[in-house]
Amino acid sequence: MNILAFGPNGSGKGTQGAIVKEKYGMDHIESGAIFREHIKGGTELGMKAKAFIESGDLVPDEITIPMVLETLAKSKDKGWLLDGFPRSLAQAEALDKALDESGMGLDYVLEIELDREIAKERIMGRRLCANDNNHPNHIAFDAIKPVEKDGELVCRVCGGELSARADDQDEEAINKRHDIYYDDKTGTMAAVNYFKNKGTAKVIAVDGSKAINAISEEIMSQLG
Ligand code: AMP
């Protein structure tokens, strides 16, 4: 099963992606997380991407597109949920072409809809687990609240160290990321509409303002 997951930063897309991955055993591919791994590992790609990410700008397509397509190809047999890509119409077209050429199909387009202001409030409270990117933690949601250990907040799943992403604490970077997301001319909403209009994958649209388990139940009920 192959799924494209869309939703503004802060909509809970990563949280839902982790739940779907767990249930269906597919790979959860997050373009932003791949970049962060590269930055952590000090790779050349990471060094090239760092400044773009910190300011909330898109990493150029010549770096991003091959990186994501190579990762996708490795998950061909297992199936994937792709999160964070495509973020523009140009990336949508490149992905569509690559899927055609590789014989990989697209089964679902998941869209988590959320008002921009609510999404912005949510971004600042999320925390990243040092051990596993698929361990969602958020200081404002009981269902995924970090736990306290020796006076520190740690990951609720594994007790790992938590951090806040620099681009999640920077209002200008958040605004830039949301400008890109809600842009329906060439930005991410244009990519969403591209795949919706193509009409080959089933569209699952959910209300991102609902509780985490209500959203995941709705998604599961619509996934075959
Ligand atoms: P995310 O974790 O999805 O919020 O992504 C963090 C950052 O990584 C973004 O703000 C971009 O700088 C970069 N990034 C992630 N995905 C893409 C993409 N598809 N195209 C370009 N840049 C991306």
Image (cartoon, grey):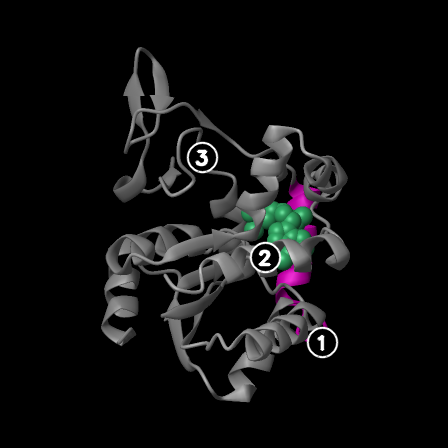
In the image, is 48 to the left or to the right of 32? right
Q: Along the polypeptide, which appears first: circle 2 or circle 1? A: 2
Image coordinates for residue 144, horizontal then vertical, percent? 30, 40
Q: CA distance from mark 2 to mark 1?
A: 27 Å
Q: Give the number of the disc on residue 185.
A: 1
Residue 83 visible to an observer of this rendering: no
Residue type at numbered disc 3: Arg
Q: Is residue 67 magenta?
A: no
In the image, is 107 to the left or to the right of 103? left
Is the residue marked 2 within 8 Å of ligand 1, measured from its CB?
no
Position above or below: 159 against 191: above
Is the residue marked 3 within 8 Å of ligand 1, measured from its CB?
no
Could you tell me which quadrant the N terminus lies in?
bottom left
Q: Which residue is mark 2?
A: 70
Residue beneath the point at 68% across and 37% down: 46
Residue type at numbered disc 2: Glu
Mark 3: few, some, or many residues within 10 Å (few <14, many ≥20)?
Answer: many
Residue type at numbered disc 1: Lys
Q: CA distance from mark 3 to mark 2?
A: 28 Å
Q: Which of label 3 and label 2 is nearer to you? A: 2
Residue beneath the point at 68% across and 44% down: 173
Image coordinates for residue 89, horizontal then vertical, percent? 68, 73
Q: Which residue is mark 3?
A: 127
- Which corner quadrant of the image does residue 215 belong to? bottom left
User: Which structural element holds mark 2?
Assistant: helix
Residue 29 visible to an observer of this rendering: yes
Position above or below: 68 against 196: above
